[in-house]
Image (tube, rainbow, N blue to C red):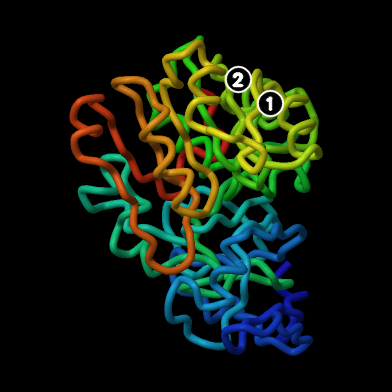
Amino acid sequence: MTSTIPLKARACVITEFGPEFVLKNDYPVVQPAQLAPGECLVKIDYAGVCHSDLHIKEGGWGPVRFPRVGGHEGIGHVVAIGEHTVDSGVRIGDRVGLKWTAKACLRCELCRTSGEPCCTMAATMSHGYGIDGSFADFALSYVDYVTPIPQNLDSAAATPLLCAGLTIYKALKETNPKVGNWVAIPGAGGGLGHLGILTSCLLLLPQCHMFPHSPGIQYAVAMGLRVVAIDTGDVKRDLCLSLGAEKWVDFKKSADLVKEVKEATGGEGPHAAVVAASNVGPLDQAVHYLRPKGTLVAVGLPSGTPVLTVPIGLLIIKCLTIIGSANGLVFSPFHKN
């Protein structure tokens, strides 16, 4: 397969902050002889677009070395592996996925305790940000971090799971979900918030072949949680309810969102809130509608440096837990537990 690798190919590149991606037909392709041990070259077949790509392109997440190929949701086939690579979990020809995190050290304390998204190496090795990403015909990645794609899972269905699905799945797991508990999902109709019933079907029943939508709701329902979807607009309302959300609150129409969310959950408030919206307002609201001992998980990452405002007395009296959750883990994209 290596004989068909061109010297140059197509790539969508960030050349400066602000303007659109630039499509280049002559972007250099890493050649097999240039691959270091542990590196692999993937011929990309499918690439998803995440809102994070826009944040990066607009400069909302800080400096980027230009030119930078965007994208961090990609599926393709391994066409080359670096010489002297040992203990590779993939082979040439395997179908694999590229995630946000291109590589973590997998040796530090964080990596050994399921915290590799916070690994120092992972912070600088992200597709489409720290290194070139999946908006290209070919992408460089790492054999110990690409995700093998199950044979019966369609590539188009799997692509959004590599970021949106993986990220919201981990965030929901952070709530220590229990069957019958209520969870509020602000931003439920967006890319993170809505990937859950059909997606959970793909994860929990691999023989079920469907396209994922709204992972947050779908995962939550699969976990036995009762969902209050928070978003705006009739289209998103219909989508969220069709995917299994029991209650809907339109934040633009609501005269008192905190009151409505509490009423939707029998007056006590949800056990958890997983905030997929990428602004601070829904986070501030959640601490007020969560029931005592509730858990707030922040997962939608905004641009800039907004600040969460939490009344300390309320935090203490209600015994709330506040957690930040950054993307997912190396082993969890198609985890079945």
Real-space Cα distance between discs 2 and 1? 6 Å
Q: Nearer the viewer, residue 153 or 189?
A: 189
Q: Is residue 142 above or below residue 205?
A: below
Along the viewing direction, whichever of 233 and 82 lies nearer the viewer: 233
Q: Which mark is residue 224?
A: none
The answer to whether 155 appears left or right of 322 in the picture is right
Residue 142, x across and y down, in percent:
49, 61
Label 2 packing within 10 angstroms: few (<14), some (14-19), many (20+): many
Decide: few, some or many residues near mark 1? Use Cα within 10 Å; few <14, some 14-19, many ≥20.
Answer: many
Tell me if 303 is positioned left or right of 9 in this view. left
For image coordinates 20% across by 25% down, the residue present is: 317
Residue 80 at what x, y percent from top left? 62, 67
Q: Quadrant of the N terminus?
A: bottom right
Residue occupied by mark 1: 197
Q: Is the residue under label 1 in contact with that under label 2 (CB below 8 Å)?
A: yes
**In the image, 144: left or right of 159?**
left
